[in-house]
Amino acid sequence: MPIYHFFNETVEQRVNSRTVGRGVKLQASYAKLALSQRIIMPFLLVFFSIMVLLIISFAFWFSHKMEQQITSSVEKTASIVLQELYREKQHLSSWVQLMADRDDVRLALKQANTLALIKLFVPQKTTLELDFLKIVNQNGRVLLDLGQRQLGNSTLEDKRSFSQALSGLYLSDVVNFSTKEGQTQSVLVGLAPVKSKEEVIGAIEIGILIKQELFQHLETTNSEHIVGFNIDKTAISDNEDLICVYASTLPAACETHWQLPPAFRPPQRLIIAGEDYLAKRVTVSGLSNSYLTIVLLKSLFTLNNTLQFLWLGLWSFFVLSALITIFVGRNIARKISDPVLAIAKFAQKVTMESNFDLRSPVMTHDEVGILATSLNSLISRIAEYTQLLQLARQTLERRVQERTQQLLQKNQELNQAYEQLSQALNELQQTQAQLIQTEKMSSLGNMVAGVAHEINNPINFVYGNLTYAKQYTEELLKILFFYQREYPQPSAVIQNQLSEIDIDFISEDLPKLMSSMQMGAQRVHDIVLSLRNFSRLDEAEMKAVNIHEGIDSTLLILNHRTKEKIKVIKEYGNLPLVECYPAQLNQVFMNILSNAIDALEERMGNRKSAIVKETLPTPTIRIYTEIIFAASGKDSVPCVCIRITDNGCGIQSNFKDKIFEPFFTTKTVGKGTGLGLWICYQIIQKHQGKIEVNSNPVQGTTFLITLPLSQL
């Protein structure tokens, strides 16, 4: 391979070629295996795949179930811990409220008698096993501070809690105290104001330390541990590595750094001192900028050992099953393949020697015996068919020559029939097109008549009631005017309502609104009348009608295409009634006027510059009618002449002789079917009339329609 061609190949092409090459080599290697091996190999692959899939699925399902049980246990224990902490806060709040409501406490606090306070509260502190008790007066001065020895050099951050208690609130909170060494610990406190005749004269605070002994009485298993943290809301984020600050049932959690799990999330795995734990974080918020964080740790040592033994047992079972399957499958495959190989060698011998007198021995009556019997029968039939084949070849050659002569003769007959069918097909297409167009116009007439009929009744109802509505409205406004004149000072409620609805504007605008509605109803009434005139379903038979009504109805239907851009000039003569098929004549007017509008729109679309737009005349359609006398044999017959002229793009001279032919159109694909003018020509011929066209690209196009006043 040239060096430049190698570098032009993409990496994907080279990878695909290598993959295809490996696949071909694998197929070649599989084909070289013995038949017994090729038989057993797919079954072994399927068996091993299913076994591996089942083992892995079972192991993952089992481990998932165990993790779910452990997670549920952690969630349950975490909720119990949180409930115990809240119960402890409520307990403190209840006791401190009882202390604050005692009369002797109020008296000692009023007198600022510290000795009396000591006699009252030292037994209470010992009985309730409180870690500290503090009493302040209404100015915030500490009158009594009974704390543990370890709190002697500590600073308790309870100023905000005391300020709220002195304001009259009963509360329980989580506060911090800091030692001089920089250590921080949380305390559960309960505070209550001491009131005398609804006046706060002081406050009492009691509390217990969050320590290891508080967690030990909770119902947890040997593998569950509780760790307490105190975190400043404004200083520490969830992503920092923290150590146990003050309380833990797991010593290793206080000696190593580990990441705090996120709050309000499911339990997560953590590694502490090289051991896996499932951790769940719960918080107890305080009123200060700190809150108590409790982390429940569940050891996963038992789970990991169980999973290791599970995987070991499953893979041992897989290996043992694989060895048994290979041994049993190999024996079964050999029993199947050996007789088949013997028959295959015999068939190869018959093929190579072309000796169809040989027969395979039948040793058994099972499928292999049936195969040997079938092979012997096949060899006998091949011998017979070989002889018959020679005779059939000779007979076939003779018949081919005879069939060739017959086919040539049939081909000539088919060509003649094809020409006849083509002519009949053209005639059928013309008839079908006319029927389709007629059916379309009939359907359009039905639809227009139906719409006009459905609209006519409600619009007559609206139009007939508008006069009464206008009269009633004027009378109501007149009565309102008299009320305003007779009662110029209405109540405040009525005055506010009149200001909101703007009664002066309504009085002025409502008559205008009724007049506009009356004009709109009249307009709809006129449109419905025009639609009924256009459909003419009640005049499907030949009848004397006013031609001008049909033209006006057609123009009204096409009004959306002509208004604001095409000028329509009607020069009607004084015509009598004309005997005709009204719906068919309306179709003629519709097709000719639609073509005129298309020509004008095409001419307007071809304006390229502002100068050309100014020089071109205004798009105009002129409709002229009059009475003429046309010669009919020796007599002259009165006829109606209808001339429709437009100043559009016109018709090229080489197309004038073809415009009345079916399926001929000068429009682009999808805009015209080539049937409109052809149908017009057929309808005019049916009325014993005549249609002519005069056109040039400069002046536009004129269609001249001549119809007799009466049909003979």
Image (cartoon, rainbow, N blue to C red):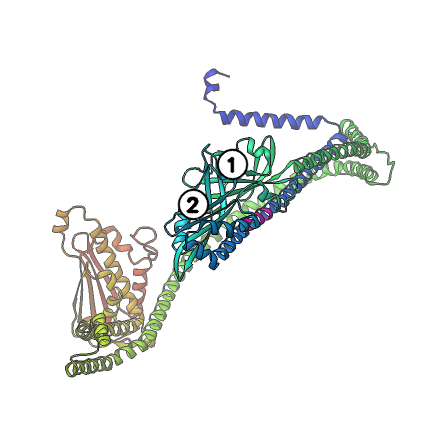
Say above or below: 293 vs 341: below
Question: How many callouts does the rendering have?
Answer: 2
Density class for disc 1 (Cα within 10 Å; few <14, some 14-19, many ≥20) is: some
Residue plotted at (24% across, 80% down): 469
Q: Tell me: 515 left or right of 216.
A: left
Q: Which residue is mark 1?
A: 245
For the residues labelled 1 and 2, the Cα–Cα distance comes to 20 Å
* Cβ atoms under marks 1 and 2 closer than 8 Å: no
Q: SS for tag 1?
A: loop
Q: Provide the secondary structure element on which disc 2 rests.
A: loop
**In the displayed image of the protein, which residue is found farthest to the right?**
363
* Disc 2: which residue: 158
- Going from N to C along the chain, the mark reached first, 1 or 2, is 2
* Kind of residue sitting beneath label 2: Asp
Visible residue check, residue 174: yes
Q: Is residue 80 magenta?
A: yes
Quick check: can you spot residue 45? no
